[in-house]
Amino acid sequence: MNRRRCLKVLALSFLSLAGCLRQDSTGGAGYGGYQATATMNMSPITDTEIANRFVYRMDDGPERKRRLVERIVTNGSATVKAGEPPIKNTGRVSNNGTIYTVSYERGGEETAIRYHVTISSVEDKISDDETVAFEELPAVDREKVDQQMIGTGTQFTYSREERDRSALVPSPDKPIIVWDSGERARFTVRESETVVVQATYHYTAETVTGVAEFGTEFRQQHGWKLTGLSEAERDIVDQAISKEDGYSVAPREAEPEATPSKALERLIERFRQHIEKGFAPRGRQNPSGVQGWYLNRYDEKTHWTKLTIDEEEF
C-alpha cells in the first residue's frame, strides 16, 4: 500500500474509534440545570493537537508500559508473558511524535508464579550492602518495576524461568532499589507465592506517519472554512472564540423571551451543509442532526468547534 493511500485509510479508520474524543459537558451551567437552546465553543487547534484527539497516545502512560512500547516500536516487535495483554489499546497509536499500527497475537499458556509486593519510599539511612542500582537489576526485573509504583502495593508475575533469573523474587538479594534520580525504594515480598496461568503475547508495530503530518492530512480532509459571514454572524463566532463559555442562547425554561437570532439560524444552516464532516461523541461521524464537533478555518486559524442545539428550536 502506498504512503498516501495508507494515510487515507488511517484517517477514515479513526472515525469509528471509541473514546478518542474528550467527552465535553453539554449541560446547563448557569441556567438552573436546563440545557441551553444553543451553544457554540471554538478554540484554536494545531495539526498535532488534531491528531492527539483521534489517536491513542502511548507516550504518556506508566513508565513500565512506556518502556514496553519503546521496545515494540524500536525493534518492530516484542514478546512478553502476562496474565492479560499488557497493552490493550492497539490499532493506530502514537508514540513520541510518530503514528504506528500496533497489533498482537496471543500464544500458548504456561503456569507462572505471582508475588504480592510492596515498593515503599526509603528516607532512613541505609548501608551500601542493602542497595542495588535499578540499571543493575536483571532485565526481567527492570521490565516489571516502575519508579511510579513507589508507595504502592502491587502484583508481579514471573515464569519459573524468569524467577530463576530474578534478583527480587522470591526474596530480594538486596531490598533497596536506587534510581539515577537518587530516589530509593524498599522492595518487599508480602505474601507467599501463588501459581497462576499466563500467556505469551507477541506485539508488532509498523510506522505509518508523523503525528503532525497525520493532523495536516486529517484537517485537509475534514476541515471547512467559515467565510462570507455577515457582521452579526461574525459576532457570534467571535464570542464563541473569545468567551470562556463560548456563545450561548438561554433555554426557554430559564428565560422565556430568549429566542435564537436569525444570524445564529444562518450559521447553523452552514453547519447542516457540512454534517458529513462533523463528529458525534466518541469519534463517530454524526449519524443524524447537526450537533457535534467540527474543524473550522476562520480568520486564518483552524478551530475545534463544538456545537450543541435544541433540535426542536431549529
Image (cartoon, rainbow, N blue to C red):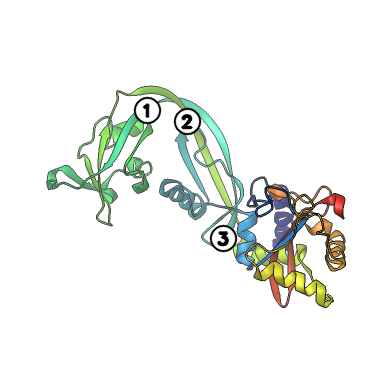
Circles 3 and 1 in contact, beta carbons < 8 Å: no
Say if 246 sits above or below 36 in the image.
below
Residue carrying label 3? 98
Image position of 87 (left or right of 224): left
Residue carrying label 2? 83
Say if 221 sits above or below 252 in the image.
below
- State the image coordinates of residue 234 (x, y, percent, origin top left): 78, 74
Residue carrying label 1? 114
The quarter of the rendered structure image containing the N terminus is bottom right
Q: Which of marks 2 and 1 is nearer the N terminus?
A: 2
Quarter where residue 122 is shown: top left
- Which type of secondary structure does the marked residue at label 1 adopt? strand
Amino acid type for the residue under numbered disc 1: Arg
- Residue drawn 73% across and 50% down? 35
Amino acid type for the residue under numbered disc 3: Thr
Whole-number angstrom distance, CA of label 3 to CA of label 1: 35 Å
Whole-number angstrom distance, CA of label 3 to CA of label 2: 29 Å
The quarter of the rendered structure image containing the C terminus is bottom right
Whole-number angstrom distance, CA of label 2 to CA of label 1: 10 Å
Q: How crowded is mark 3: few (under 14 residues within 10 Å), some or many (20 or more)?
A: some
Image position of 314 (left or right of 156): right
Circles 2 and 1 in contact, beta carbons < 8 Å: yes
